[in-house]
Structure formats: C-alpha cells, structure tokens
Image: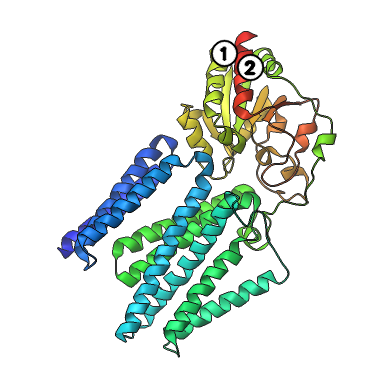
Amino acid sequence: MQTLTTVAYLAAAILFIAGIRRLRSPATARSGNTVAAVGMLVAVVATLFDADVLSLAEIGAGIALGSVIGAVTARRVPMTSMPQFVAAFNGVGGGAAALIAFAEFYRLFLEGGEGGFVVLFTIFLSMLIGSVSFAGSIVAFGKLEEIFLSGSISFPGQKALNALVALVSLGAAGNAIVGGPAPLASAVVALVGALLLGVLFVIPIGGADMPIVISLLNAFTGLAAAASGFVLTNSVLIISGALVGASGSILTYKMSSALGRPLQKILFGAVGAAPAEKEGDGEEKPVTSGSAEDVGALLNYDADSVIFVPGYGLAVAQAQSAMAELMRLLESKGKTVKFAIHPVAGRMPGHMNVLLAEADVPAEKMLDLEDVNPDFADTDAVVIVGANDVVNPSAREDGGSPISGMPILDVDNAKRVVFVKRSLSPGFAGIDNPLFYDQDKTMMLFSDAKTGLEGVIAAVKNS
C-alpha cells in the first residue's frame, strides 16, 4: 500500500506540473486546469488510504461540501472579479495551513512530546506564513471588492509597528520551539501576531499594485503548504506547495516588472495609493470628442491598419464580443486588425487574453507589449477601450509620476488614437492621461464600452 501511495503521489505531482505548463496559453489553459484538478483528486484519494484520518464518510462529506461551494462560486464570479476571487481562495489555503500547523502543535503539547527542533520549526513556519497569507488575502479581497479598507491606509510609525508585531510573533514562536515557559500561550501569541501582521502588511497598498500583492500572498500560501507537508510527512503536499510558491514568486516578479517598479518599493512604499484627488482637473481641458458615427467613418475610410487595446473597462462592460465582432467586420473590408495586450491590462497577466479568447479572437492576433510596440508607428488607428494607465505617456515622460518607469503600450506613436471611455476620470493608479488632450491625434468617444463599440459597428456597416 505504501508503494502504491508513493506512485500515486508521483503521478499527482506530474499532473500538477503538466497542468501548470498548459496554463501558459489560452488555447490550452482549460485542459491544463482540468489536468491539475485530476492530479489533486489523485492526491486526495491516495491520502485517504495513506493516513489514519477521519472516517471516509466524514471526509466525503467535507469534499462534497467544498466541491459544491467551489463550483457554484467559480461559475458565478465574473472574470472582472478574478483577482479578488484568487485572493479569497488563496486566503482559505493559507488559513488551512495555519490551522493544520496549530493543531499539530496542540497535539504535541497534549501528548507532552518534544517533537524535535525541525518539526517544531516547520510547524511554526507554516503557522506564521499561513496566517500572514490568510489575513492579508482577506484584506486584499475587501479592498478590491470595496467592502472595507479601500485605498491606501497609512499612519505615523506604521513601519515601526509592523516591525514590532513581527518581532513579538517571531519571539513567541521561538520561545515555543525551544521549549520555554507557557509554550501553548506562546503559540497563540505567534498566531495572533501573524494575523495582525498580515493586515498591517496589506492595508497601505492600493491602486494597481493590489494584484501583485495577491500574487505574492499566493506564493506565501504555497510555502505554508510545503511546510505543512513536512509537518505531516506528506510528499505531495510538499511538491504542490513548492510549485505554488515558485510559480507565485515568478508571477509576482513578472507583474512588478510590468509595472516598472521594484517589489520592495511596492510593498514598503505605499506606491499603489492614488495621489490626491484631481476632481475636475481633466474636465476643464479641451478635448476632441466624437460620436460612434465619427469613429466608424475614421475606421472605414482613413484606417487600413487598426490595433485594439482592451482594458479593464472593457472587461467590466463585458464588451469583448462586441470588440471581436468589430474586428471581423473590419477584416471583411480588407483591414489589418491586431490586439495589443498589456501584462496588467485586466489587472492580472493572461486575464485579457482569456476574455478575448471567450469571444473567439484568435490567439495569434493577441500581441504582447514587447511584440506590438514597434507596430504602432505604422498603424493608422488605435482604438483603446476602457484602458488608461497602460497607455499613459506620463510613465515615459514624467519622472515624478506614480507610474514613472512602467512599461506602456506606445499608442501615441500611431497616426490616430480613439478612446472609448465613460469620462475623463483617471485610471486605477489615480492619475490623468495627457493623451486625452492631444486634439490633433486623439478622439474621445464618451460611452460605456459595449454601447460604444456596438454604435461603432453599426456606423461601420452603414457608412
């Protein structure tokens, strides 16, 4: 039986790796998710035969309840809410790892066993990291859903308080590990301190940086799960936790690079906070606004090459199908159409690719930032739908801008630029876009993304 369990764990690990590999492309992402899910099923079944756990009926009831909750939630959550959905699920994983670690320590305490330094160290490693991930993910979820603690929250002495809470939590954990006085009370203090640290860690971060923090917390959960694997001597938990930790760390690095800011600046500088409100600043500047008919005429008669730039506003309006229909309409008239995808256009890498794939946009038409930027200079028209920060020239030209240094799509190099946007309000980073006010190049179509694109489609057909 032990040999069969080991083989099952190895098969599960292979399925995890194969599933993650297939997540690299929208064309294979769905099957990759299924492959990884099958791997998890294999791991769960193998664990039931490997350990002396609760009765199969109790385990089955737990699996059934969790499966129903997961399936219903996943079907109801829109793609626009995927970052907070990831945060919520990630928090559950971190909390589970912390509870497992605390329960194992409590068992050792009741049995009067020493446990050994390595066992106790991994127990508290899982407890501390899992608690930080749980509390931080809950705060991240609340921020993105605008339920509580929205924006950036900072106060004098915040970093000093963070350091103090971290030292108290680590000190209590150390005391319990070396067998000092009141070990159970020390474990409780360490757990509560880590939870508080998770809250303090995330509350100063806001704006476009929140998805990066979610990715980092996801990596934390992976590390906590791997540590739990050592505690429970479960090899598949070690492997899966290491995979999550590594992939989450890589994703965090890629996202921070896409924003052009060092990770430590994001985490400790409250850079994601929107600056002081500029209500009305942009409204007083002259812009060239147009109707859907004006945009349709531009695309019909003055543009042989068009690049679409989808943003978060397109995702919110669920306008991907309308954009895909406009693509097919323009191509039927002999136009060349491409899509420029910024890594954080939908708040998370791959987010926008999935939305467009749902609307049957071919994957080869979705070009990454580094591939599409050279094409803008030879493009007749760029249609930007619901995006702002990722096309803001301030990132290149204004050294004092909060997004200074962030790689952007060079849409201002195109001959004409069209924004489909509700208003001149700033983007997620809270800053104005000077490209709005280039009256010789830019046309503003003030509209909801879906309504605006549908109006352009009708105009192109009729003009």
- Quadrant in the rendering for residue 31: top left
Q: Mark 1 = which residue? A: 334
Mark 1: secondary structure: loop
Disc 2 marks a residue whose amino acid type is Asp
Image: 381 above or below 153? above
Which residue has dot 2 on it?
304
185 relative position to 293: left or right: left
Residue at 76 percent of width and 41 percent of height: 432
For marks 1 and 2, give the CA distance: 7 Å
Q: Give the farthest residue toward the left.
A: 1
- Mark 1 residue type: Gly
For the residue carrying disc 1, how many other residues have a C-alpha within 10 Å: few (<14), some (14-19), or many (20+)?
few
Name of the residue lying farthest toward the top: 462
Judge whether residue 235 can be spotted in this image: yes
Q: Residue at x 52, y 82 (%)?
A: 171
Relative image position of residue 316 (x, y in whole percent): 57, 36
Question: Residue 205, located in which quarter of the rendered image?
Answer: bottom right
Do the CB atoms of the residues marked 1 and 2 lie less than 8 Å apart? yes
Residue 338 shown left or right of residue 414 in the figure: left
The image position of residue 261, as x and y in percent, is 65, 54
Label disc, if present, on residue 452 of the rendered structure: none
Instruction: Classify 427 as above or below 39.
Output: above
Q: Which of marks 1 and 2 is nearer the N terminus?
A: 2
- Colour approach in the figure: rainbow
Residue 40 in view in this figure: no
